[in-house]
């Protein structure tokens, strides 16, 4: 039986610890029980805090662990939850966690940092030179703090040398299901997901991200270009025409635009169009072909390919995730019958 240690941290989002608890307790147990079959416990799960004392999670929810981190001699899996957005303060408060993580990784444990919990793996130096992810909103800050880490904000889950990271609160469930699949079997992971009514696999978080089209920059002229593109995205925005409109040679325009925004002009236009399409898919029921035409693409096949490349989802999948709720009601019997 594999041993799982779930860390509980003060002021954190409880679901990033409780979600994995549910997955590992359910694996091999819940699905057979629901079907009237014999369950099979696959994981021995223990909850810990730094000192073994109760902690107060976000919103005042009290959580009582079974042990302290120092009570754990060996474990196969460690789950590190998020502990709030005040990163500097939490790194100081929870500094005892860092050598403990390094020790158990050296002993062979898989360690998963859920959502912004990946900051503890990075601060411990475990992620240097390795791929990692976190919540998309924290990526720029984490890239600045930990430049040696290969941050992948497009991915929901990363794994590199027994170090796993996941982006977003509910991804704590996804990374736990991934570990069930990896260490037990795909069938058990699927059964667990079905019992918990959780989709799998979720791979990308690109479609969830709300990121600026470009990082902050000081090139006022290029900011004017960006504003113009965002207002006129449906028109033909060629490099030469944009350069001429803003009084630059094509070569100078390309150089300044790429230096300021991190994108080539064509890629920037595509990103603007996809953002508008995402907004339309969230709010109305227009056909994908209508939306493609509205944002400037008459070739709907090209639009679908572009949309999936930038978001990790097809337009239809995106709408099913983020469109308006549509609850189908059962037919109501006629009162006269």
Image (tube, rainbow, N blue to C red):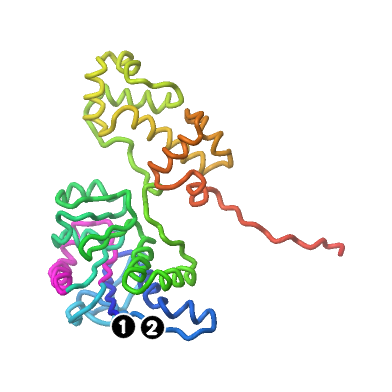
Give x and y (percent) for residue 172: 35, 64
Horizontal arrangement in the rendering, residue 108 relative to residue 152 (left or right): left
- The residue sitting at 49% across, 69% down in the picture is 194
Helix, strand or loop for disc 1: loop
Disc 2 to disc 1: CB gap under 8 Å: yes
Give x and y (percent) for residue 208: 40, 49
Q: Which residue matches tag 1?
A: 1
Instruction: Quote the CA–CA distance across marks 2 and 1.
Output: 8 Å
Horizontal arrangement in the rendering, residue 14 relative to residue 141 (left or right): right
Residue nearer the viewer, 189 or 121: 189
Q: Does the magenta stretch include residue 288?
A: no
Horizontal arrangement in the rendering, residue 203 relative to residue 234 (left or right): left
Q: What's the magenta region?
A: 78-107
Q: Quadrant of residue 276?
A: top left
Give x and y (percent) for residue 239: 32, 20
Vertical arrangement, residue 206 with respect to residue 227, above or below: below
Q: In which quarter of the image is residue 131?
A: bottom left
Which quadrant is home to the N terminus? Answer: bottom left
Which quadrant is home to the C terminus? Answer: bottom right
Q: Which residue matches tag 2?
A: 41
Bin the neighbour count of mark 1 within 10 Å (Cα to Cα): few under 14, some 14-19, many 20 and up. Answer: few
Q: Is residue 80 magenta?
A: yes
Residue nearer the viewer, 179 or 91: 179
Helix, strand or loop for disc 2: loop
Give x and y (percent) for residue 25: 39, 78
Mark before the other along the chain sequence, 2 or 1: 1
Q: In which quarter of the image is residue 218?
A: top left
């Amino acid at each position: 039986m594999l041993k799982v240690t779930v860390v509980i941290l003060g002021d954190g989002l409880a679901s990033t610890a409780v979600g994995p608890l549910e997955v590992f307790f359910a694996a091999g147990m819940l699905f057979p029980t629901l079907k009237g079959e014999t369950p099979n416990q696959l994981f021995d799960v223990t909850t810990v805090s730094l000192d073994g004392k109760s902690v107060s999670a976000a919103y005042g929810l009290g959580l009582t662990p079974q042990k302290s981190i120092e009570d754990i001699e060996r474990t196969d899996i460690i789950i590190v939850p998020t502990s709030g957005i005040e990163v500097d303060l939490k790194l100081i408060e929870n500094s005892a966690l860092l050598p403990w993580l390094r020790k158990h990784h050296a002993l062979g444990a898989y360690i998963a940092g859920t959502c912004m919990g990946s900051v503890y793996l990075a601060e411990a130096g475990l992620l240097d030179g390795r791929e990692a992810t976190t919540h998309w909103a924290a990526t720029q800050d984490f890239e600045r703090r930990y430049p040696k880490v290969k941050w992948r904000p497009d991915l929901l889950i990363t794994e590199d040398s027994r170090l796993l990271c996941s982006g977003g609160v509910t991804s704590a469930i996804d990374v736990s299901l991934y570990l069930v699949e990896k260490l037990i079997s795909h069938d058990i992971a699927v059964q667990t997901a079905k019992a918990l009514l959780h989709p799998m696999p979720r791979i990308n978080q690109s479609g969830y991200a709300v990121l600026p089209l470009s990082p902050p920059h000081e090139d006022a002229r290029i900011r004017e270009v960006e504003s113009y593109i965002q207002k006129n995205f449906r028109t033909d925005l060629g490099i030469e025409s944009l350069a001429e409109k803003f009084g630059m040679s094509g070569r100078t325009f390309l150089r300044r635009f790429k230096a300021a925004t991190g994108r080539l002009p064509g890629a920037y236009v595509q990103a603007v169009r996809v953002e508008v399409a995402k907004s339309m898919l969230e709010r109305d029921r227009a056909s994908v072909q209508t939306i493609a035409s509205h944002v400037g693409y008459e070739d709907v096949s090209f639009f679908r390919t572009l949309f999936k490349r930038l978001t990790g989802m097809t337009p239809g999948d995106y709408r099913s995730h983020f469109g308006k709720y549509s609850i189908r009601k059962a037919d109501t019997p006629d009162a006269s019958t």
